[in-house]
Amino acid sequence: MMAKNMLTDQFMEPLNGARTALIDIHAGDGNLIIERLTSGEPLLVSGTLQYFENQGAPTRSLASNSGQVTFMLRGGRAGQSWFHLPWSACNGATEWQIQLNPAVTSDLTAHSDGGNVRLNLAGMTITRLSADTGGGNVEAVLPDNAADLNVNVKTGAGNVTVEIGSGLAGSNVITAASGAGNVVVRVPHGVAARIHATTGLGKAIMDPRFSMIDKSTYQSSDFDSAANKVEITVQSGAGNVSVNTL
């Protein structure tokens, strides 16, 4: 039987001169939303966290060294085991809303055991993103003007959508994968890309500007000579995989 008493924890961590951050968030089996802080307050991170009374409150830790901070956030022990259906039917019992300081260069890890994960990182500075859930959907909007970005987004059963920001610089690597759902990556017009696409039961759907090189590889005509480019891997066990141009 599900615990009926849902509580809310609100928190704020001061900036304290942080310039770079390792952010590691584990939302238990709930939904997770991460976006940028818009209040202008000197904060590193703030959030509103739902949890059931029998789980215990989420725990936080913060360590700082010469302008780099490591922030970890963990959900309490789950009060019950949730059965998650794939695709849109999956939804966590609780919701976490997290806001990060856009001026801090962040290495971000975001995890849910089975809820949906939504990341709106527009306007932020991200060097690495690892986001995953056991069975929910994952939506990630990546920042504009990112450079040498490393992104890994995956789910056990839901759908995955990744939107790449404009002004991409350097060599960037993006992996998007689902065990059963559809996977979509959106690439800005004019960005050179090579795509590795595999699916067990679905089909690969590619924008016409990407030519087939072999049975699972596609690329834009300017990829080999481009200074700024992205290497994309899209995978699904049962759904469709597609790469579209914004």
Image: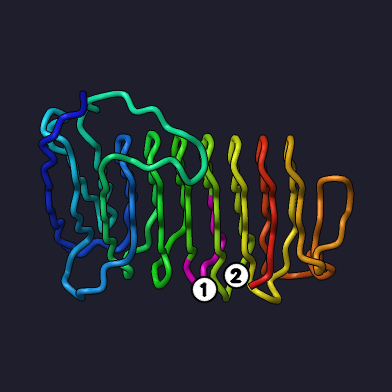
Quarter of the picture holding the N terminus: top left
Q: Are marks 1 and 2 in contact (CB under 8 Å)?
A: yes
Please, is residue 74 above or below residue 8 in the view? above
Q: Secondary structure at mark 2?
A: loop
| Picture quadrant where residue 50 is located | top left
Q: Nearer the viewer, residue 244 or 59?
A: 244
The x and y percentages for residue 141 are 48, 63
Q: Amino acid at mark 2?
A: Ala
Asked whether residue 199 is drawn in magenta, I would say no
Please, is residue 231 above or below residue 199 in the view? below
Judged left or right of residue 88, residue 174 is: right
User: Which numbered disc covers residue 169?
Assistant: 2
User: Which residue is denoted by mark 1 in the rendering?
Assistant: 145
Q: Secondary structure at mark 1?
A: loop
Q: Which residues are magenta?
A: 143-151
Residue depicted at x 17% and y 69%: 42
